[in-house]
Image: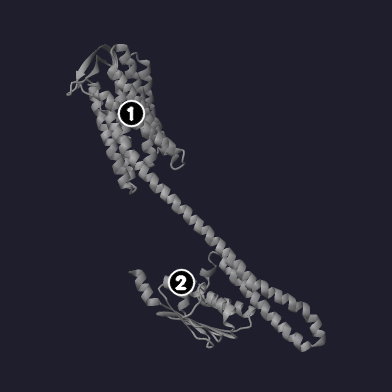
Amino acid sequence: MILVPTILNIFAGICLYVGLLHLLIAFGRLKPLLHFCFGLTCLVVFIYILALIAKYKAMNVDDYINARKLVSALGYIDGILTIWFVALYTKVKPVRLLLALNSLYLICLLINQISPTGIIYSHISRLSSISLPWGELITHPEGTLNPLVGFQFLALISNVVFVFYACYRQYQRSEKQAALILGLSLAIFVGTIQHDRLIDLGVFKSLYLGEYGFLAFVVVMSLQLVKDLMQAVKLRKQLMESERLRKIAVELERNRLARDLHDSVSQTLFTVATIAEALPRVWKRNPETAQQGLEELAQLTQGALAEMRNLLVELRPNGLVEKPLGELLHQLTKGVQGRASLQVITTVSGEGDRSLSNEVKLVFYRITQEALNNIIKYAQATQVSVSLHGDSQEMVLRISDNGCGFDSNKIPSGHLGIAIMKERAESIGATFHLSSYPGEGTEIVLSWLTTVNKIGSEE
């Protein structure tokens, strides 16, 4: 029977596939060094298993020695790569310690290459055969142990201590599942390696199991790495989507500011320029009319300044946060009064607006802004009242006008202003009420219960 070489060839194929897979993943720039190190480790084990098959099939001492020296050399290289993989995966990377651990394996590698029969044996007299339970024979050497084999045990013990310490550190960082999976797969691998060292010491004769232990490590860690990769890809997509939405929001905000500049400041300044140009001629013919023009000019200029202040406040990251809500509403209404023929009465009472959260303050500000814009565009009003009353229990905003009004039950599709105001109110748990009838004006009431929302947030 040739069961062992067949199984080992299957294992070699698995390691080759996994190694190439992770090398390809490394070129995808998602944790490239980690996947490159793991993929390279798997490819080294692939060659290690092929050399092990040659060692089992060796028919003379020279062929056996050459195969065994190659197996040992690949084992040390694999040990170096495994140490770096564990360091990268657990993020425990003491460079000087890692170099010291690597130097132990490099010394073993040097001794193995210099010694005529490798690092394990100083002399191999002949080859014998071991009969496995199913009747298959594998080659086993008869010889004298090399005293320098102690370097191999020192390197193995030192590296085992480090890898389990790295797992412990990872576990302490609350990466418990990852640490346990890595620790379990390493425990299986280390256990089989210790079994093989006992065979080398002549404690018993058996089949080497290191490659089987490493296959378990390869399969378990490959699945874990792929899982981590999928999570990283998902997170990257989420970040890309967030960035796309951020850019859209920035573009929408820029368009809104441009529209506000055009609708308010730009048109107001155009009117100011027109009046200023006509005033000298009007003054000569009718000083009283010119005086009225000067008063209108002053009003328009103040309105434009107020609008610019509002826009500048919104452009600053903390502009809407630093000022009390009452002051922000005064600035809004002053700007509206300057660019439209409106009499705006603004009333702010109570001190509740000073204790509002930034989120609540922003919702009140945006709803007022949207309502005033709608009044200017559609209401045909001459008077507007904006009142804000707040105390320790409730904050109430009322906005009313004497305009043409409308049937609130028949809002045309595409007019999203009211729906947006309702959504903003719901986002902070406030009550939004709009009442309007044709020819009777419109009133908006926004009510936010301070006490209820504070209790809800604490719970």
Q: Which residue is mark 1?
A: 12
Nearer-N-terminus badge (1/2): 1
Q: Nearer the viewer, residue 375 or 151?
A: 375
Dot 1: element: helix
Amino acid under disc 2: Arg
Q: How many numbered marks are there? A: 2
Binning the other alpha carbons within 10 Å of mark 2 as few (below 14), some (14 to 19) or many (20 upward) gives some
Residue 302, above or below 111? below
Q: Give the residue drawn at x 79%, y 88%.
A: 286
Q: How is the image coloured?
A: one colour
Which quadrant of the figure contains the C terminus? bottom left
User: At which x and y percent is residue 237?
Assistant: 45, 51
**Which residue lies under the disc numbered 2?**
424
- Badge 1: residue crowd in 10 Å (few <14, some 14–19, many ≥20): many
Residue 9 visible (yes or no): yes
The residue mark sitting in front, 1 or 2, is 1
Q: Quadrant of residue 196?
A: top left
| SS for dot 2 | helix
Q: Would you say 242 lies left or right of 79 here?
A: right
- Along the line of sight, the residue nearer the viewer: 165 or 301: 301
Residue 24: x percent and y percent? 44, 37
Q: Is residue 405 left or right of residue 151?
A: right
Kind of residue at badge 1? Ala
